[in-house]
Image (spheres, rainbow, N blue to C red):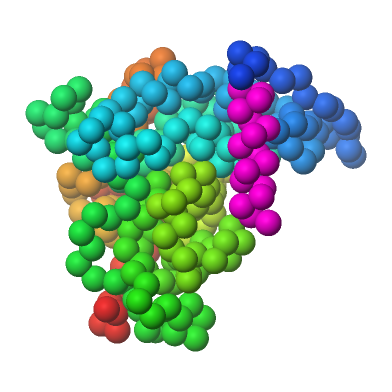
Amino acid sequence: MESKWLLFSTMAIMLALGNCQESVKPLVKIVKGKKLCDKGWECKGWSKYCCNQTISDYFQTYQFENLFAKRNTPVAHAVGFWDYHSFITAAAKYQPLGFGTTGDKLQNMKEVAAFLGHVGSKTSCGYGVATGGPLAWGLCYNKEMSPSKVYCDDYYKYTYPCTPGVSYHGRGALPIYWNYNYGETGEALKVDLLNHPEYLEDNATLAFQSAIWRWMTPVKKHQPSAHDVFVGNWKPTKNDTLAKRVPGFGTTMNVLYGDQVCGQGDSDSMNNAISHYLYYLDLMGVGREEAGPHDVLTCEQQEPFSVSPSSATSS
C-alpha cells in the first residue's frame, strides 16, 4: 500500500507542478467556529495549516537545485537519487500536520531551511576547498559508505530483532542507525524497514519521509519534537530554562542528537549544522539575519535532552 501511495502521489504532484507551480486555492469549511482547509495533493485532509501557504508556494524546484547544487556531480555518491519531487511528495504527508505550514511565509521558509540544514549537514561530502564551497555539497550521500559495524543492539531482540545478514548502518536524509530506530521508523511509516533497511537507499521519497517523520515526532515521551521547538509550539519548563534550552534552531539539534552534539561547547558538528542552516536561509532569500541571536542558534551550553545509550550489547 505504501509503495502505491508513493507512486500515486508522485504522479499527481508531477502533474500539478508541471502547471507552473501555481498556488492552489484551498477548499474551505468551518467546523465548530474554526476554519479548516484542503489543498488537494499537497495539503489534504481538512487542516487549519492547509489554509496557509504550502511549501510549493514559496520553495520551488530552482531553490532546491540552488541549495544542493553539487549533489549530482560525478564525484558525489548518490548521483541521480535526490530531487525536488521526492522532497515535496514526502512533505505533502506532513504539511497538514504543520510541516512548513504552521505560520506565515517567513516562519515557514525558516522551518524548511532549518530541516534541510540538518539534512545538508548530515549528507554532505563538502570540505574546505571543495568546488562551490563546503556548503554546496548536501545530499552527496544516501547511505554510510564504509560502515564499521552492523549496528545491531540485542537489547531490543524481542521488540526489534535484527534480521540475519542485515546491516543497520546509516541511511536516509537524516541518517538512521541501529535496528531499533529502523524498527520504530518502519512502524510509523508502515514500511518493513527492520527487514529491509535498504529501502531507504532505494527510494528518495521514503528517505525524505523518514527524515520529516523524525523532525515532526518526539524522540522520547515527555520531550518536544524538533518541529515544535522550532516553530514555537513548545513552551520551556523551569527545568528547561535552567538547562538553557530555548525555542529555536539550537534546540532542534538537542532534540535530534542529544549529547552527541549539545553541551560540548563550540563543536564542529554543531557549527556544521548551523552553517548549513544560515547558508540555506541566504540562498532562499530569507537572509541569515532572520535566524536569531547566538543563544537561539547554538546548543553549546544546553543540557542534553537525552544521553547516548551504552552500546555494550551492540555489534
Is residue 145 depicted above or below 127 in this figure? below
> Is 130 situated left or right of 174 in this image?
left
Q: Nearer the viewer, residue 53 or 10?
A: 10
Foreground of the two, 196 or 310: 196
Q: Is residue 11 magenta?
A: yes
Left or right: residue 70 versus residue 236 is left
Magenta stretch prevailing secondary structure: helix
Give the quadrant of residue 89: top right
Visible in this render: residue 64? yes
150 in relation to 3, above or below: below
Left or right position of 7 against 248: right
168 over 95 or under it: above or below:
below
Residue 4 belongs to the span the image colors magenta: yes
Vertical arrangement, residue 20 with respect to residue 11, above or below: above
Identified at 49% across, 26% down, the residue is 109
Say which of 310 and 18 sits in front: 18
**Residue at image x 89%, y 38%?**
31
Quick check: can you spot residue 225? no
In the image as oriented, which residue stretches furthest toward the left?
A: 129
Q: Is the N terminus in the top left, top right, bottom left or bottom right quadrant?
A: bottom right
Tally of marks: 0
Residue 309 percent coordinates (x, y): 32, 73
Please state the extent of the stretch shown in magenta in the rendering.
1-17
Residue at image coords 48%, 77%: 160
The image shows residue 117 at horizontal and vertical percentages of 36, 36
Residue in view at x 42 percent, y 60 percent: 198
**Which x, y percent locates residue 225?**
51, 51
* Residue 113: % across, % down: 42, 30
Could you tell me which quadrant the C terminus lies in? bottom left
